[in-house]
Image (cartoon, rainbow, N blue to C red):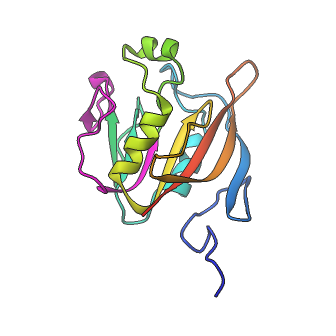
Amino acid sequence: MAQPTLIDIGWELPAYTQHEDGYIYGTWFCGRPTEKYYGAFPKSFWPRAKVMLQIPGGLMLHWFSGTVGREPGIITIDGNKEVSPDVVCEGIVLPFDDCFFDSAFADPPYSPTDAKRYGMKYPPARSVLREMARVTKPGGKIGLLHEFLPVVKGSGAKLVGAIGILNGPQKRVRALYLFEKQG
């Protein structure tokens, strides 16, 4: 019996995204952010990411959500109450039970300098990944937007892809790292 592919298990791929040998990859030229908020998503990033991560009828976590508005099926979490998240959470321990969400996404500060701009303590990417895996159901999708791939070993997640995110000259190059919660 053939091993199911990423597409068979529900990874919908937007434009400029490929898959081969069980791995998702691509490069998205997303344009400049339309928000004035520091760290806002490039223009076309969030619609593409949601296509991949949101499970129809499921509940999705969006951690470090910033100014992204509320949407059905998505719980926003941020340490800054001024951006009106569904849940205010300043630390790196989420106030949810294990295996609560069908999918999860986080866009944490990428460095201690970035964290200082947000008025928070720097959350190491490895800790963020581990906590997202804790609150995601087995087989669930996890996305992490960051400048580097965190150590995956011991996180409870398996790396299944990486997509380069570009948004213009003199701007940081980030990657959307894709994971599947392990059983």
In front: 49, or 36?
49
* Lateral position of residue 171 relative to residue 179, left or right: right
Q: Is residue 32 magenta?
A: no
Q: Where the N terminus falls, by quadrant?
A: bottom right
Image coordinates of residue 155 in percent, x first then y, are 46, 46
Q: Residue at x 46, y 44 (%)?
A: 105
- The quarter of the picture where residue 29 lies is top right
The kind of secondary structure the magenta stretch mainly shows is loop
In front: 166, or 98?
98
* Lateral position of residue 41 relative to residue 123, left or right: right
Asked if 133 appears above or below 109 in the picture, the reply is below
In front: 100, or 57?
100
Asked if 117 appears above or below 15 in the picture, the reply is above
Count of number-bearing discs = 0
Name the residue at the front extreme. 154
- The quarter of the picture where residue 165 lies is top right
Q: Residue at x 41, y 30 (%)?
A: 67
Q: Is residue 82 magenta?
A: yes
Q: Residue at x 45, y 17 (%)?
A: 115
Q: Where the C terminus falls, by quadrant?
A: bottom left
Image coordinates of residue 163 in percent, x first then y, are 67, 45
Q: Residue at x 71, y 52 (%)?
A: 25
In front: 75, or 89?
89
Image coordinates of residue 100 in percent, x first then y, are 29, 55
- The residue range painted magenta reads 78-105
